[in-house]
Image: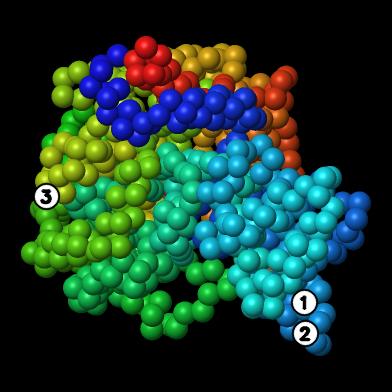
Amino acid sequence: MNTKFLDLLAQKYDSEEKVVTEIINLEAILNLPKGTEHFVSDLHGEYQAFQHVLRNGSGKVREKIEDIYKKVLTEKEIKEFATLVYYPEEKIKLIKNEFDNEEELHQWYTVIIERMIKLISYASSKYTRSKLRKALPSQFVYIIEELLYKTDEFTNFKEPYYSKIVQQIISLGQADKLIIGLAYTTQRLVVDHLHVVGDIYDRGPEPDKIMEALINYHSVDIQWGNHDVLWIGAFAGSKVCLANIIRICARYNNLDIIEDVYGINLRPLLNLAEKYYKDNPSFRPKIQPDETISDEEKLQITKIHQAIAMIQFKLESPIIKRRPNFNMSERLLLEKIDYEKNEITIQGKTYEIENPCFATINPEKPDQLLTEEEEVMDKLLFSVQHSEKLARHMNFLMKKGSLYLKYNGNLLLHGCIPLDEDGNMEKMVIEDKAYAGRELLDVFEQYLRYSFAHPEKTDDLATDMVWYLWTGEYSSLFGKRAMTTFERYFIKDKATHKEIKNPYYYLREKEETCRQILEEFDLDPDQGHIINGHTPVKEINGENPIKANGKLIVIDGGFSKAYQSTTGIAGYTLLYNSFGMQLVAHKHFNSKEDVLQNGTDVLSVKRLVDKELERKKVLETNVGEELLKEISILNSLMEYRYMK
Ligand SMILES: O=P(O)(O)OC[C@H]1O[C@](O)(COP(=O)(O)O)[C@@H](O)[C@@H]1O
Ligand SMILES: [Mn+2]
């Protein structure tokens, strides 16, 4: 091994004892049970439901509480305690109102602190002390460790010492803070690592809050979804991606994400919209039953929605023309319209255009942007690329994200591996070279990263490729023949709205297909699973999220409220701990208030996917692999420096 490197390392481990201690520490970690992985997907801006799932660890918190307290506490007490762990600040406030005097409150504090300490001690039993220490609220580390490691066996006399500590905390007015800290520590301990299998953005109202939660989360990775790359594309300079994100926000009545959250000025777009558009039933925003909106506002959004949709359709055209390899010429729909007759001919069939809004279209050159439209897009792009908050969120998406991830033997990816009907990986030619399977995904990712690194380039291949990832036939994130956005706005016949899925989506039911894909990614097909999001699982129609004899799991149950009526549930999550894999189906999440008042938990039907024959250890994980490498380096250091 390079001696320079070892000399440098010796600066950190400057004594034999330090090296030995670290080796022993790492070896010990290798033999602990593997930490719990938590998989979620298709969050679609539904922050409230998402944060609940994070706080309750898809039921893990409650499970731990039941393990220790089922026999001693009533169902109501367990519920109350669980709610306290999920929402400590709010729950403490509510509980405080119930007490008539200080004494009762102090008694409650004493009991709860003890329960919390016991819970943490249990939840952390598979971690090292050093890991637990990192999870503790920093201002109370010393005190909590004292409380945690009391061993009554030999030191009976210590009991008064501990109750003294607790009483002191209470009388010094620190009990609330301590309980809150302990609650968050518990949440953190039940889940070791979070995977977000794509689609944080669009449709729901608070994707930014999800991003903030992820930024603050202790350990997370992201597999981009098609909606996430749309936002990345907009930030990276793709105007067509930008038009899409604004269109979707208008459609779901979420323009405040653009304006208020990310500080992007929509005034120029509004002016254009007011000038050229009027009310149009096809473009009215979708309003959730619990939302209120004035007629005036609704009309304004309807106009913006049309303005940006028409800009989007125009912007698609030059890309389709300059990228024949995208094979999208059938999507040049503006050219297929007879503007006099108000008809469109698609694949030989002519349809009437419903609710047209073509005031900015020059029938001779239908994809030509008006100067005003161009100016609007320039200003919007400038504004997007100068939004500090958006920059922070997009940088985080890039840092923690990838198109796919191999993790502990499993393959995580949002959409699909494009296949033909016989199950062969589809080839796509990019710059004269054909790519398929894993190579195709790798090259997609390279283009996306290049585009992000060059936001000043707006029509190069890399930038166009990000849009392709959103909507292209062989995009691993989309995986449908074409996106029929235009048809859904303008053609009544629902047959034209259908988006034909890549054969992957039925071939993945077969174990053989999934095994082949795992092999393509150098994963062991006997051990590994494919974990997908993207396509809502319609439990309502009896669809099973566990496919191919357990080799593939789809976890998009639809956090998205807009899709819950088609799925019948409110999302799946997956847990993978040392005992195996469990799929959790969540019921509809009402509100945080409902949980606080009534202890209603959205859970959950659990289904076992796979049971480990023997408890899985850290040694057998990705982290274990890294630790083994570290141990080997430390052994080299030991030999080089200290064993002469
Ligand atoms: O329901 P909406 O908002 O019209 O969106 C429909 C579009 O969203 C898509 O389903 C993509 O979004 P998902 O990744 O969430 O499925 C497209 O296939 C489809 O055209
Ligand atoms: Mn998706």
Amino acid marked by disc 1: His
Q: Secondary structure at mark 3?
A: loop
User: Looking at the image, what colour scheme do you see?
Assistant: rainbow
Residue 140 vertical placement versus 90 (above, below): above
Q: Is mark 1 within 8 Å of ligand 1?
A: no
Q: Give the residue at mark 3.
A: 456
Q: Is residue 299 depicted above or below 552 in this figure?
A: below
Q: Amino acid at mark 2?
A: Glu
Q: Closer to the N terminus: mark 2 or mark 3?
A: 2
Circle 3 Cα neighbour tier, 10 Å, few/some/many (<14 / 14–19 / ≥20): few
Viewport quadrant of the C terminus: top left
Q: Secondary structure at mark 1?
A: helix
Question: Residue 347 location in percent, x, y?
Answer: 32, 36
Across and down, in percent, residue 542 comes to 70, 38
Q: Single out the mark in the foreground, 2 or 3.
A: 2
Tell me the residue at 13%/58% (across/down).
Answer: 369
Residue drawn at 25 percent across, 18 percent down: 3
Report the residue at 73% width, 45% height from top: 122
**Is residue 380 shown above or below 267?**
above
Does mark 2's beta carbon lie closer than 8 Å to ligand 1? no
| Label 1 – label 3 distance at C-alpha | 61 Å
Q: Earlier in the sequence, mark 1 or mark 3?
A: 1
Q: Would residue 450 be seen by someone viewing this image from the given angle?
A: yes
Distance between the alpha carbons at the discs numbered 2 and 1: 6 Å
Q: For residue 411, say whether it is visible.
A: no
Q: Position of residue 334 (x, y in %)?
A: 22, 50
Query: Do the CB atoms of the residues marked 2 and 1 lie less than 8 Å apart?
Result: yes
Tell me the quarter of the picture where residue 73 sits. Answer: bottom right
Q: Which of these two is toward me, 295 or 244? A: 244
**Which label is found at residue 157?**
none
Q: Which residue is mark 2?
A: 102
Q: Which residue is mark 1?
A: 106
